[in-house]
């Protein structure tokens, strides 16, 4: 009989860190609201959520790793919005943010969720921050709950 493991979407009792970028705050605040909504609707109390604001997506990995290393959190949710400008800066910020978050998760063994939206324009960002494409903050927060419970099952 094949053993199948998957995480339940029950968040009560788990502790979550959130790292959110202030750059494009109009978008990121909506992502944060979506993450709070997901955590609350899956039973997470405000007392079990800690939110840290950083200047931009480039700074997310460091604070996410610090949170993960602290032992205080079962998962860390990273939220940001990188919107392409006129130069190659977009590619560097996206790449380093994604790589840094992934490396921090593997280094610490704590689920660190990639909730940084990377878009070609503001319209695409708005679509992913609570309009026609949903709210990516809600999605990654829900995935964080799943990962916390999956790890407990292993
Ligand atoms: N252009 C965007 C940035 N740029 C700022 C960097 O993330 C970083 O804060 C700065 O280079 C100082 O180290 N950040 C975003 O989150 N989104 C952008 O679109
Ligand atoms: C994603 C970015 O870093 C972007 O906002 C920077 O804009 P620009 O490439 O026009 O300097």
Image (tube, grey):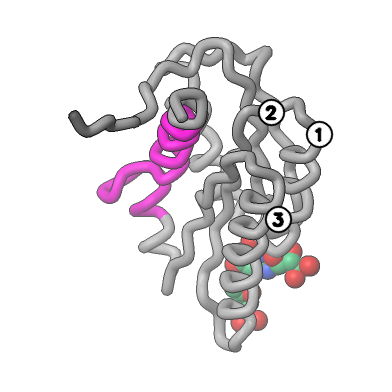
Question: Residue at position x 57%, y 70% from top?
Answer: 94
Residue in the foreground of this view, choosing between 111 and 128:
111
Quarter of the image where one finds residue 41:
top left
Task: Measure the alpha-carbon separation of dots 1 and 2.
Answer: 7 Å
With respect to residue 11, does 121 lie above or below? below
The quadrant the N terminus occupies is top left
> Which residue sits furthest front?
1
Task: Measure the alpha-carbon separation of dots 1 and 3.
Answer: 14 Å
Q: Which residues are magenta?
A: 126-147
Quarter of the image where one finds residue 69:
top right
Residue in the foreground of this view, choosing between 68 and 108:
108
Between discs 2 and 3, the one toward the N terminus: 3
Membership of 137 in magenta stretch: yes
Instruction: Name the secondary structure under disc 1.
Output: helix
Membership of 93 in magenta stretch: no
| Residue 64, horizontal then vertical, whole percent | 71, 46
Task: Measure the alpha-carbon separation of dots 2 and 3.
Answer: 15 Å
Q: Tell me the chief SS of the magenta region.
A: helix
Instruction: Name the secondary structure under disc 3.
Output: helix
With respect to residue 82, does 37 lie above or below? above
Question: Residue at position x 31%, y 43% from top?
Answer: 134
Q: Is residue 135 left or right of residue 105?
A: left
With respect to residue 139, does 121 lie above or below? below
Between discs 1 and 3, the one toward the N terminus: 3
Label 2 vs label 3, nearer the camera: 2
Residue carrying label 2:
73
Residue 40 in sight from this viewpoint: yes
Callout 2 touching callout 3 (CB < 8 Å): no
> Which residue sits furthest bottom?
87
Label annotation for residue 61: 3
Disc 1 CB within 8 Å of nearest ligand 1 atom:
no
């Amino acid at each position: 009989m094949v053993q199948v493991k998957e995480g339940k979407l029950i968040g009560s009792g788990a502790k979550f860190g959130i790292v959110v970028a202030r750059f494009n705050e109009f978008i990121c605040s909506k992502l944060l609201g979506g993450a709070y909504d997901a955590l609350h609707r899956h039973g997470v109390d405000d007392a079990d959520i800690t939110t840290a604001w950083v200047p931009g997506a480039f700074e997310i990995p460091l604070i996410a790793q610090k949170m993960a290393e602290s032992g205080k959190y079962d998962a860390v949710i990273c939220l940001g919005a990188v919107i392409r400008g006129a130069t190659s800066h977009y590619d560097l910020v996206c790449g380093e943010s994604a790589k840094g978050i992934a490396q921090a998760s593997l280094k610490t063994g704590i689920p660190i969720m990639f909730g940084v939206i990377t878009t070609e324009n503001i319209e695409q960002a708005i679509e992913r921050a609570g309009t026609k494409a949903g709210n990516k903050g809600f999605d990654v927060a829900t995935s964080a709950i799943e990962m916390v419970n999956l790890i407990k099952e292993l």
